[in-house]
């Protein structure tokens, strides 16, 4: 119903414009208009309202790359600076690096006071001090840093995944706003056309060319165009607010965007897309880093079977004999009960789980890509069909009906129906382009999105 109203308004628009250019005596004539006057009522009706033919097909208006406005690259740059989740992910990388430094530091030495036989025969007894050091064996500190190094890699992959999420959301939001922007422009044209359409229908009724029902239909179309404009403006406002939130600058005011919905779309194949995803996905890379971490952790726990050595040396002065002597102590735990066997089994199980996690992520990526690629393939085929067949046929049909109407072969309602069909087709074409852009953004973003969700520890 809504699209039908839109089309009617558009068809009546050019006729109104031409009728307004006629002398007053013709516009108020009581007698039926001559047959040739019908042709003067709609000479511009065949002009495509949504776009113009190019080598790429029919493109939405204001979509030329040279159109002024904010570009996608500018929005991506702002998002990389302002989106808080990227700062969070970067902070976690720094935290992991700090942990890597800390776990490899050697234990501090211990110094202390020694005193014995104090007060014996009223003397100070033996007074002195000691120094102790834990000797770390089996390269445990290096192994600690190896484990932490893999945790750093995992944190870096989390950051990379988050960057993809941010960029994907920005791209989706950009094209959502761009479609909404085009819809507002179209709705504004329809409102003007609808207002002129009412005037034209009233003139035709006065000339007894159409019945009052045609005037009522034109008014319905004009009112519907107003509703469509309000809806388009609300949709544009909502889409812009969503984009501003993802960018990280909610105070950003709506600004015209520069871009073309159909430019720079690279065709994808399933095999190439899947192979690229398995190579570039930070989720899979993070899972593989998890396997490396688990292996390093297993080596560290195995080294834990070798006990550390406690070394201590002290010096005391005996006030009774006035002698100075030295003491040395060496302590080594005997691994009789605790041979770290529980931690080793735990590390082995975690390694097995990490290996299966890699397989799970691979299958999950395939599953997600299957759904996204279906959306991409469908939208791509639709866009090609619209460019190659549907849009040219819709335009030709509109031209033929408009020509037949001028020659008296078709009624005014037939003309409105043809216009309605053209507008419905054009709006469906915009929807197909939006779906295609969303799918392309998901594929290029390695299926990552939802950038403002709470940042998880995993990828």
Image (cartoon, grey):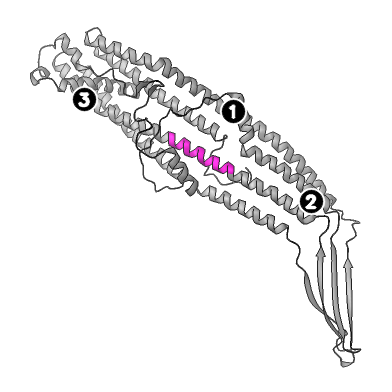
Instruction: Please tell me in which quadrant of the rendered image residue 217 appears.
Output: top left
Going from the N terminus, do you reach mark 2 or mark 3 first? 3
Assign the magenta stretch its main secondary structure.
Answer: helix
Which quadrant would residue 53 be assigned to in this image?
A: top left
Q: Quadrant of the N terminus?
A: top left
SS class of the residue under badge 2?
A: helix
Labelled pair 3, 1 in contact (Cβ < 8 Å): no
- The part of the chain drawn in magenta is 160-175
Q: Position of residue 171 (x, y in %)?
A: 47, 36
Secondary element at image label 1: helix
Asked whether residue 216 is in view, the answer is no
Q: Earlier in the sequence, mark 3 or mark 1?
A: 3
Tag 1 residue: 273
Rate crowding at label 1 as few (under 14), some (14 to 19) or many (20 or more) other CA atoms within 10 Å.
some
Marker count (numbered): 3
The CA distance from mark 2 to mark 1 is 39 Å
User: Does the segment drawn in magenta span residue 114?
Assistant: no
Q: Where's residue 36, x and y in %?
A: 16, 10
């Amino acid at each position: 119903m809504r699209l039908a109203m839109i089309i009617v308004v558009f068809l009546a628009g050019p006729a109104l414009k031409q009728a307004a250019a006629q002398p007053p005596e013709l516009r108020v004539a009581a007698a039926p208009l001559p047959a040739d006057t019908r042709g003067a009522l709609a000479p511009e009706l065949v002009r495509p309202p949504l776009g113009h033919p190019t080598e790429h097909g029919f493109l939405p208006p204001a979509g030329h790359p040279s159109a002024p406005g904010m570009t996608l690259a500018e929005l991506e740059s702002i998002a990389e600076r302002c989106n808080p989740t990227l700062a969070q992910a970067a902070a976690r990388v720094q935290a992991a690096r700090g942990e890597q430094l800390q776990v490899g530091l050697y234990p501090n030495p211990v110094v202390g006071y020694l005193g014995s036989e104090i007060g014996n025969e009223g003397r100070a007894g033996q007074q002195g001090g000691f120094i102790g050091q834990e000797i770390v064996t089996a390269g445990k500190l290096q192994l600690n840093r190896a484990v932490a190094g893999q945790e750093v890699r995992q944190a870096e992959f989390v950051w990379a995944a988050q960057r993809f999420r941010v960029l994907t959301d920005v791209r989706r939001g950009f094209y959502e706003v761009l479609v909404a922007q085009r819809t507002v422009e179209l709705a504004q044209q329809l409102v003007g056309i609808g207002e002129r359409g009412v005037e034209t229908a009233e003139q035709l009724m006065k000339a007894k060319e159409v019945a009052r029902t045609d005037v009522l239909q034109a008014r319905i179309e004009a009112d519907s165009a107003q509703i469509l404009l309000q809806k388009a403006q609300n949709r544009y406002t909502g889409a812009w607010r969503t984009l501003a939130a993802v960018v990280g600058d909610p105070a950003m005011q709506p600004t015209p965007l520069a871009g073309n919905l159909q430019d720079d779309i690279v065709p994808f194949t399933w095999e190439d897309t899947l192979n690229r995803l398995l190579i570039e996905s930070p989720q899979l890379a993070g899972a593989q880093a998890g396997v490396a971490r688990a292996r390093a952790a297993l080596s560290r726990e195995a080294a834990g079977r070798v006990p550390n050595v406690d070394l201590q040396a002290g010096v005391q002065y005996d006030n009774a004999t006035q002698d100075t002597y030295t003491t040395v102590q060496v302590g080594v735990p005997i691994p009789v009960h605790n041979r770290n066997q529980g931690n080793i089994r735990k590390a082995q199980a975690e390694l097995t789980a990490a290996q299966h996690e890699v397989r799970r992520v691979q299958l999950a990526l395939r599953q997600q890509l299957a759904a996204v690629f279906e959306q991409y393939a469908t939208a791509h085929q639709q866009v090609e069909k619209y460019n190659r067949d549907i849009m040219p046929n819709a335009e030709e049909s509109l031209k033929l009906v408009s020509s037949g109407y001028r020659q008296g072969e078709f009624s005014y309602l037939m003309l409105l129906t043809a216009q309605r069909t053209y507008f419905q087709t054009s709006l469906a074409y915009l929807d197909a382009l939006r779906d295609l852009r969303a799918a392309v953004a998901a594929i290029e973003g390695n299926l990552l999105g939802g950038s403002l969700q709470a940042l998880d520890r995993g990828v």
